[in-house]
């Protein structure tokens, strides 16, 4: 069941009505309704994965209590590592086993040996990367005594399986979500209205921007060997907007949906393409994952303490692991590595926290410099996205090589019966709307909200891609 | 909560109103467009009189040159549409009858397209703007699963087929951007040749009785149109040319022209002839089935 499906359009009002009209009198009822809805939501992909979700929930729930009750630090450590190992073990088997088996076979082939690895015919459970990290953050927080373990199994289960964030995040923290789950939610009109605006804007990003861009990006990436430089540049730009519209659109719908139940989720995107350097980009892109890695990997590794060599090592580990988290393919690792390389000069020159403040533009040299920096950051991000999108690293390298050597910049007519430049006006309008509303969660609220809402609805209906249905990219992770 | 329910009701009203308005707008624009595709040309035309009409897929669109017929005193038009199947050809013929076309001969391509009783989504979409205004189109699609949604939900048809009749096509229709669909009396020549040519593989094709073809036969019989069903050429490297023998076993009346042109120089791809091939082929067909009206 996807957020932009007819099924969800039926499911959501039913849950909403049950939640506010039947279960509104107590927090217990509200949580039961949400948990049943969440399990139903998850079972729509494959009911068998429910067992995995319940097992993971039980494991974290029991482990947390065991850690808390442990008398000695070695016992605490034992429970922590047991839980972490089992969680990562599941993730490893489902997501990475085949990749490692194949890579091992290819590696020994280089030394003249042959191996036929036993590959598992496994379907990747939807959202496993998200809810595994979700549970891990809870366990680690318990271990470091940042929070108390949750005794109520229903409340804890809801924390793990809450349907708006179950399959593609944001990756929540127990410190943020559990306190909200533990109290009865009262209906708040302003919050619910804000939720609707976020859902509508999320749909614009998904069905208008991401899905339109994907039509062109797929065509260009699938036929990059015959495309000219202009098309290849546009292909990278279209993919940048596809993945942004897709994932941030999904996050907006998730956040908006959750607001309808009176629960706030962590903000996942903060207009990342208006970043002035790559460090700022990573503070604004997939914030819940970046901060997860920062808090549970980077800081335990030593973070920015220690000498430069230590910091560089930690940075590379974070980016490589982040790339690998996205999928079992070397292209994702390469994408992580490229981002680490982008980050390196900022780290070495101590400039990685230079652009943390907000900015305004005026008619001065500083503004020109800011715009130039934004453009450069966006461009290098697009280059990295080529590795993320390409099927293999070789494809990505050849794509880039052709982009810089072909040097033909005339418009091309594709097999999909469209010209390469057809989508530029739509992308530019989208950038302008985002730019003018970059201090808000979404552009609909405020003055003339009804007019803006109507325009968004008209855009979804008239400009949305419906005949060639696209799934959310991040569901595969 | 009451305030929120009012808010939602207003939002829902906006959605419905927007759908109605967009439907009216799109339909109005398509109603005044008659040169973007052969279907809108057909919809807006009336009382045409043709000696020969060509119907079929790209293997008609790229293969029959009306000029060769017209130079001999015939009035012809190539209504072949790339990706069209026999179901769409049948509907086009029904529309011609509805529009009081006088057709003496119908040359219908029946070869690879007989392999499937399915429809072409890309071509079906082009009929959708006229769903409310044409009884023929409505009746034709009455049995398809999404018929009620297409007919009764405003704007649904434009969303469902957005790739072909969505915003982009509506915009081009509104600004009267011309296409080459109607140039050369409907003939679209292929000017580039794929080399090396990739052999077409018909080993997975199984000719079977076809509903669309049967329907076309019935329409022709009822309206006294001389139906000439024929195969069109494919390159000699085609795998499983035996397909045409099987086809002939099922429908013996289909005239065999698959070997009318054989040299590779006449083919753009294995399944489609280039411009020279089309000229050569049309001359062969004309010579085999027609006589010049104008004295040479």
Image: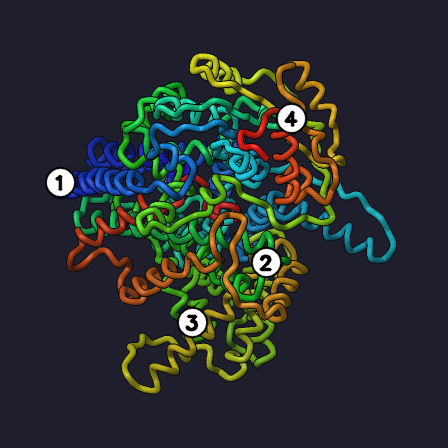
**Chain identifier of the residue bearing label 4 in the image:** B
Q: Horizontally, is B293 left or right of B260 in the view?
A: left
What whole-number distance in Å separates the C-alpha atoms at marks 4 and 2?
62 Å
Which disc is residue A280 wearing? 3
* Residue A372, horizontal then vertical, whole percent: 42, 78
Q: For residue A287, what is the image quadrant?
A: bottom left
At numbered mark 2, what does the secondary structure look like: helix, strand or loop? helix
Q: Is residue A233 above or below residue B137?
A: below
Q: Do the residues labelled 1 and 4 touch (CB within 8 Å)?
A: no
In x, y percent, where is residue A258?
Answer: 30, 46
Mark found first going from the N terminus, 3 or 2:
3
> In front: B291, or B85?
B291
A418 or A127, which lies in front? A418
For the question of whether residue B143 can be seen, the reply is yes
Q: Which of A47 and B240 is in front in this view?
A: B240
x 72%, y 52%: residue: A103
Categorize mark 3 by other alpha carbons within 10 Å: few (<14), some (14-19), many (20+): many
Q: Is there a contact, CB below 8 Å, between mark 4 and mark 2?
A: no
Local packing at callout 1 (Cα closer than 10 Å; few below 14, some 14-19, many 20+) is few
Disc 3 versus disc 4: nearer the observer: 4
The residue singled out by tag 4 in the image is B288
- Residue at the spot 34% in from the left edge and 87% down from the top edge: A365
Q: Which mark is residue A332?
A: 2
Rendered image coloring scheme: rainbow
Q: Residue A11 carries which label?
A: none
Give the residue at mark 1. Answer: B6
Q: Which residue is drawn at 73% across and 34% down?
A: B238
């Amino acid at each position: 069941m996807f957020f932009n499906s007819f099924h969800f359009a039926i499911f959501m009002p039913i849950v909403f009505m049950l939640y506010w009209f039947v279960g509104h009198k107590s927090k217990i009822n509200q949580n039961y309704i949400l948990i049943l809805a969440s399990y139903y939501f998850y079972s729509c992909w494959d009911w068998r994965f429910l067992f995995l979700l319940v097992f993971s929930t039980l494991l974290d729930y029991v482990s947390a209590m065991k850690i808390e009750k442990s008398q000695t630090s070695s016992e605490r450590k034992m429970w922590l590592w047991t839980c972490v190992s089992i969680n990562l073990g599941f993730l490893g088997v489902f997501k990475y086993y085949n990749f490692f088996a194949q890579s091992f076979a290819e590696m020994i082939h280089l030394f003249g040996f042959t191996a036929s690895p036993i590959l598992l015919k496994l379907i990747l459970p939807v959202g496993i990367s998200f809810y595994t990290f979700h549970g891990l953050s809870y366990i680690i927080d318990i271990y470091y005594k940042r929070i108390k373990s949750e005794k109520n199994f229903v409340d804890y289960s809801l924390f793990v399986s809450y349907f708006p964030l179950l399959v593609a995040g944001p990756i929540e923290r127990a410190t943020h979500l559990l306190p909200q789950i533990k109290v009865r939610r009262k209906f708040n009109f302003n919050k619910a209205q804000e939720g609707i605006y976020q859902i509508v804007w999320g749909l614009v990003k998904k069905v208008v921007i991401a899905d339109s861009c994907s039509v062109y990006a797929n065509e260009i990436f699938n036929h990059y060997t015959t495309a000219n430089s202009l098309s290849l540049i546009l292909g990278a730009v279209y993919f940048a907007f596809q993945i942004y519209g897709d994932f941030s659109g999904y996050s907006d719908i998730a956040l908006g949906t959750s607001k309808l139940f009176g629960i706030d989720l962590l903000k996942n995107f903060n207009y990342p393409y208006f970043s002035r350097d790559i460090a700022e980009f990573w503070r604004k892109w997939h914030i819940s994952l970046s901060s997860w890695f920062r808090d549970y990997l980077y800081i335990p590794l030593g973070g920015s303490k220690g000498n430069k060599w230590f910091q560089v090592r930690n940075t590379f580990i974070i980016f490589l692991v982040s790339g690998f988290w996205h999928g079992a393919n070397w292209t994702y690792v390469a994408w992580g590595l490229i981002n680490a390389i982008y980050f390196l000069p900022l780290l070495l020159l101590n400039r990685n926290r230079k652009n943390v403040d907000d900015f305004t533009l005026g008619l001065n040299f500083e503004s020109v410099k800011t715009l130039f920096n934004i453009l450069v950051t966006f461009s290098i991000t697009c280059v990295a996205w080529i590795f993320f999108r390409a099927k293999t690293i070789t494809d990505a390298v050849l794509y880039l090589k052709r982009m810089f050597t072909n040097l033909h910049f005339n418009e091309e007519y594709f097999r999909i019966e469209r010209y390469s430049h057809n989508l530029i006006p739509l992308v530019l309008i989208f950038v302008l709307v985002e730019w003018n509303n970059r201090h808000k969660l979404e552009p609909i609220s405020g003055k003339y909200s009804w007019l803006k809402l109507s325009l968004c609805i008209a855009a979804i209906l008239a400009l949305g891609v419906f005949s060639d249905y696209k799934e959310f990219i991040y569901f595969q992770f | 909560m009451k305030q929120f329910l009012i808010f939602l009701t207003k939002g829902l009203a906006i959605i419905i109103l927007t759908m109605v308005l967009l439907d009216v707008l799109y339909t109005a624009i398509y109603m005044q467009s008659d040169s973007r595709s052969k279907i809108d040309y057909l919809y807006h035309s009336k009382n045409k009189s043709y000696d020969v009409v060509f119907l079929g897929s790209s293997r008609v669109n790229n293969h029959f040159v009306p000029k060769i017929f017209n130079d001999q005193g015939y009035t012809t038009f190539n209504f072949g549409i790339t990706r069209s199947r026999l179901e769409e050809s049948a509907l086009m013929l029904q529309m011609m009858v509805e529009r009081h076309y006088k057709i003496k001969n119908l040359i219908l391509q029946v070869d690879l397209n007989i392999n499937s009783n399915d429809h072409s989504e890309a071509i079906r979409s082009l009929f959708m703007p006229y769903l409310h205004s044409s009884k023929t189109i409505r009746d034709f699609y009455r049995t398809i699963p999404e018929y009620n949604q297409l007919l009764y939900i405003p704007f649904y048809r434009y969303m469902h087929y957005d790739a072909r009749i969505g915003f982009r096509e509506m915009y081009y229709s509104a600004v009267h951007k011309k296409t080459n669909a109607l140039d050369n009396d409907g003939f679209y020549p292929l000017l580039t040749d794929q080399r090396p040519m990739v052999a077409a593989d018909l080993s997975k094709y199984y000719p079977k009785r076809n509903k669309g073809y049967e329907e076309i036969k019935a329409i022709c019989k009822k309206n006294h149109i001389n139906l000439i069903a024929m195969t069109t050429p494919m390159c000699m490297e085609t795998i499983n040319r035996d397909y045409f023998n099987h086809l002939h076993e099922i429908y013996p009346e289909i005239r065999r022209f698959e070997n009318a042109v054989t040299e590779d120089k006449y083919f753009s791809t294995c399944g489609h002839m280039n411009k020279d091939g089309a000229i050569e082929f049309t001359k062969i067909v004309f010579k085999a089935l027609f006589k010049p009206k104008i004295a040479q």
